[in-house]
Every structure is written in C-alpha cells, then in structure tokens.
Amino acid sequence: MTSTVPRELVHRAAVAEVFLTGWSRTAENRFALTAQWPRAHSYFTPVNGCYDPLLASETIRQVGTLLSHAEFGVSFGDQFLMWDLHHSVRPEQAGVGAAPADLELDVICSDIRRRGRRLAGMRYEVTLYCGGQVIATGGAAFDCTSPAVYQRLRGDRVGATGVRPLPQPLAPASVGRFLTTDVVLSATERPLEWQLRVDEQHPVLFDHPVDHVPGMVLMESARQAAQAIDPSRPFLPTTMRSEFSRYAELDRPCWIQAEPLPAADNGDRQVRVTGHQDDTTVFSCLIGTRGAAE
C-alpha cells in the first residue's frame, strides 16, 4: 500500500502538500526515495501540458528535510537555513499523463557537517526518474541550527507578521496564474521591478506559520517576474538556480527586479531576478526557459 511520508518530516501541515512517499538508504550517504506528482494541484498547475517545474524544486526541498530528520538525527525543533535550491526539468519527459507521475529519486549527500553529534548542514543532489527516464535533476544546500541559536539569531523577528494591507496584485494572466490570490507581485512605477506580495493566508505558499518569507515564495516571485516581462509568451521555468543570502522579512517591503539576458541562438531565454529589502540583496535567481516553450 502506498501512502505519503509523515507530513512532519517535510515540514508541511497539509497532507495534500506532501509529495514524497518513501525512502531507503542505499549507501552511507546515498538514498533512494519515491514520490508522486498529482495530475492536478491547486497551485502547481501544469504549463502547456507539462508538470509545473516548481514541483521539482518543492520535491527536492522536501527531500532535504526528510533525510535530515529520518536519517541524520535532526530534531523537529531545529531550524533549517536554505542557502541554495536548483532544478533542471526535461519538459519532453514531464508531460502530464493519464495517471499521476510516480517518481524514483536518487539522492547523494555531500559536504556533511556536524557540531558534535548534531547535523550542522549539508549539500545534496537529486536525480528524478519517471518510467525509467530522467525527468529532472536538482539539489540544495542548507544549515541546521538549534532553537536556542535560532532565537538569538532572529530575536524579536520571531512571531513577526506581514505588511498590511496587501498591495494590489498584478493581473493573474500577466504572470501565468489563473487566480488573483496566487499572484505574488504588485506593480511599481519602475520598469521590471515589482513589490513582493506576501499573503500569509495562502494555503500552499504559507502552509504553516513562519517568521520570514519562505524560499519557495521567493522562487515563485522569480517565475512570475520572468513571465511578466512578456505575458504573451508562456515561460516554462525549465531551469532555476536560486541563492538565498539572508532572511526576507514579512513586515518590510521586498522589491523584485528582473534583468532579461540575451536569448541563445536556439531561442532559449534566461532572466536574472533579484530580491532586495532595506537596500540589501536577500536572494537571486537565474531562471531559464527553452525556446520550444515560447
């Protein structure tokens, strides 16, 4: 019988947001995991018949928390600090079929650091297979910290809430969304710059209370910014490489800027997206789409 892994292992409150279904250790620092992507999802909606590539990033994120708790002894009270997260999806293998996509994941962990017996951080790379074919690759790096250290690090930021009222969203169609509630960007007077729209009531992006803007929200802002450059051409984010340099706070404006890069000869496009808060960079993302996605 197939079921999802316990939601606590992947830091999700809703069982519907858990994509991993099992795991086993195959070598000292290598693991085999299974996952399932639904044919339809309330937020990770297909793009031109292809699974939303951000499903790959969310699945990869879940891999790190699961292995940390289940295999590396990280306590549930510890906090995770994500430094980078990336994916590369093969759209020709990622079409939505007549049944949910059952995936097999090969995970290799490296740069494993400990403080005494506690895991301090690591890096891992993931290859995702569907039907024996590689559907995506990716990876991430993070640090772990104890509740006491996190409290000292965050201070009075723990328990902070977001900016109210929410700024007006862009038109959903202009950022590749169907619903206004799924839009994370708000217009500004400056070209190729938007204000991050942080809706802490969103049931997927804010699956549970947090004291900072989640990395997946920042990645979604990069996807929407890339699409907003030219709403008439669908932007399937087949590649994303995000780096997080500091926490994005909930209660201060965060500005998202996009820089389109020259298109490749084959039509592939890339956009460099950065997020700034209080004149400091909080994240950067290089996001790309294949020419065939235009």
Image (cartoon, rainbow, N blue to C red):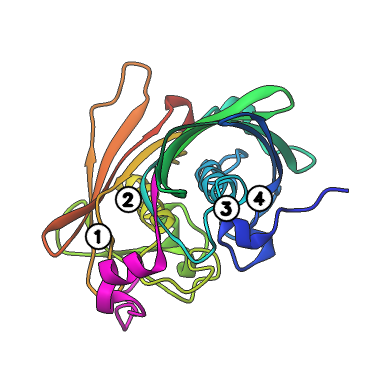
Q: Residue at x 46, y 62 (%)?
A: 78
Asked if the magenta segment contains residue 155, the reply would be: yes
- In the image, the segment drawn in magenta is 142-169
State the SS at label 4.
loop
Q: Is residue 251 visible?
A: no
The residues tagged by marks 1 and 2 sit, at their Cα atoms, a distance apart of 8 Å
How many numbered marks does the figure carry? 4
- Residue 181 versus residue 223 in the image, above or below: below
- Numbered disc in front, either 2 or 4: 4
Residue tagged 1: 194
Q: Residues within 10 Å of mark 1 (few under 14, many from 20)?
A: many
The residues tagged by marks 3 and 1 sit, at their Cα atoms, a distance apart of 37 Å
Residue tagged 2: 225
Q: Which mark is residue 69?
A: 3
**Residue 14 percent location from the top left of the image:** 64, 67
Asked if the magenta segment contains residue 270, the reply would be: no
Considering every residue shown, the one lying at the far left of the view is 279
Which sits earlier in the primary sequence, circle 4 or circle 1?
4
Query: Is the Cβ of the residue at disc 4 closer than 8 Å to that at disc 1?
Result: no
**Residue 111 percent location from the top left of the image:** 40, 33
Q: Residues within 10 Å of mark 3 (few under 14, many from 20)?
A: some
- Numbered disc in front, either 4 or 3: 3
Q: Residue at x 63, y 33 (%)?
A: 31
Considering every residue shown, the one lying at the far bottom of the view is 165
What amino acid type is highlighted by mark number 1?
Trp
The residues tagged by marks 2 and 4 sit, at their Cα atoms, a distance apart of 26 Å
Which sits earlier in the primary sequence, circle 3 or circle 1?
3
What amino acid type is highlighted by mark number 2?
Ala
Q: Which mark is residue 19?
A: 4
**Residue 155 percent location from the top left of the image:** 26, 75
